Image (spheres, helix red, strand yellow):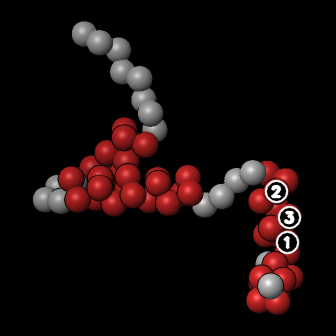
Amino acid sequence: MVTVAQTIKRNFKGVVAHWKSGLTNAYMEGLNSVFQATKRKARGYRSSVYLITMLYFIAGKLHLPAR
């Protein structure tokens, strides 16, 4: 119990921020996972512009019109 109390005391601002906003870093971790998978798919492309384009395409949730 003492260890838990000390941990909460050390991270009090973060604990309060979590309770106010309800946010965690889970979204960013998931996004990082998507980016890492995209980097693996982009291997072999000639420039980083193609990687950035793929990241926008995949993570940007673009809705492209059907032909």
Left or right: residue 9 versus residue 31 is right
Residue type (three-letter) at the residue carrying disc 1: Lys
- Whole-angstrom CA distance, mark 2 to mark 3, is 5 Å
- Outermost residue on the left side: it is 44
User: Which residue appears at 46% of the width and 38% of the height?
Assistant: 60
Q: Which residue is mark 1?
A: 13
Say whether marks 2 and 3 touch (CB < 8 Å). Answer: yes
Quick check: 30 above or below 64? below
> Left or right: where does residue 51 sit relative to residue 7?
left
Residue 43: give x, y in percent of width and height.
Answer: 18, 59
Query: Which residue was labeled with disc 3?
Result: 16
Q: What number is the disc on residue 19?
A: 2
The kind of residue tagged 2 is: Trp
**CB within 8 Å, label 3 to label 1:** yes
Can I make out residue 46 in this image?
Answer: no
Q: Is residue 24 visible?
A: yes
